[in-house]
Amino acid sequence: MTFEPDTPLTHAVCTAHNREPRRGGVKPSLLVLHYTGMGSAAKAIDWLSRPESGVSCHYVVDEHGVVTQLVPEELRAWHAGVSNWKGETDINSHSIGIEIHNPGHQNGYPDFPAAQMRSVIALSKDIVARNHIRPENILAHSDVAPGRKIDPGEKFNWLLMAREGLGLWVRPLPVRADDPGLELGAEGPRVLNAQKNLAAYGYGLDASGVLDADTEKVLKAFQLHFRPRRVDGRLDRSTEGTLERLVAASSKPAAA
């Protein structure tokens, strides 16, 4: 079976088996970006289309910028897995998922080519315009599944995306060599304030005042997306300041 693609930017359709109606009849309000973590885009498309994979996605963008659609946007794809954002745990029903071909951290983790980024930007613009997705709801897989997932990773060009109106971005505070940051087990008001800010932005995290394993995972997820120069899960002043800037930016009213 095949279907009509949702966008003229689609070069090919390869219908995935794992798809179903969005639960509760919800409309997509999130765009989640992944990397494939496989040796080739062709292998990723083949796997994502198979019933035994237990996964799927709406789109795959290969290293040359070729776009393949696997699931119609009106349907629920199986791309986010166990995840959480702003208290919502059925991210698959609330999102559209793009898999960007990259072999991933375990296989050399090359840069994302310019042609691929241009295609991801064009596709993302088309998706968010048609589905009225807010910039702060354009997320990494690692944002909605901290610790479990690290894609698309620190090399993905979120700054370029933001310059094109895709995703919220603030300039990260400089990383200082003389500030290693608070580590696992630390506690106090700095930790509590950071936890509150992370939760306010959307990460699934309780504010306990203790830098526990869950907080370390979320800090790493935040750093992968917003402060990629040093991803270590520690709470340094650069991470704190960047997070405060981000929360302030997210609280501004949307432009008319």
Image (tube, rainbow, N blue to C red):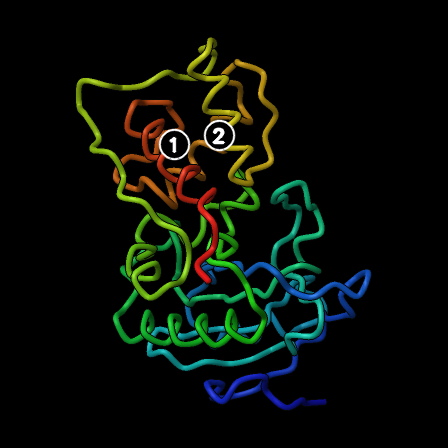
Percent x, y of residue 86: 62, 42
Residue closest to the eye, 44 or 30: 30
In the image, what residue occupies the spot 67% across and 40% down?
87
In the image, what residue occupies the spot 60% across and 78% down?
70
Residue with the most extreme right position: 24
In the image, what residue occupies the spot 50% across and 45% down?
143
Residue with the most extreme front position: 256
Percent x, y of residue 144: 56, 46
Instruction: Give the answer, above or below, for where 107 lies relative to 131.
Output: above
Residue closest to the eye, 48 or 89: 89
Which residue is disc 1 drawn over?
A: 244
Percent x, y of residue 19: 72, 71
Amino acid found under the numbered disc labelled 2: Asn
Label 1 crowding class (10 Å Cα cut-off): few <14, some 14-19, many 20+? Answer: some
Q: Is disc 2 placed on a helix, strand or loop?
A: helix
Q: Is disc 1 placed on a helix, strand or loop?
A: helix
Mark identifier at residue 197: 2
Residue closest to the eye, 94 or 163: 163
* CB within 8 Å, label 2 to label 1: yes
In the image, what residue occupies the spot 58% across and 21% down?
207
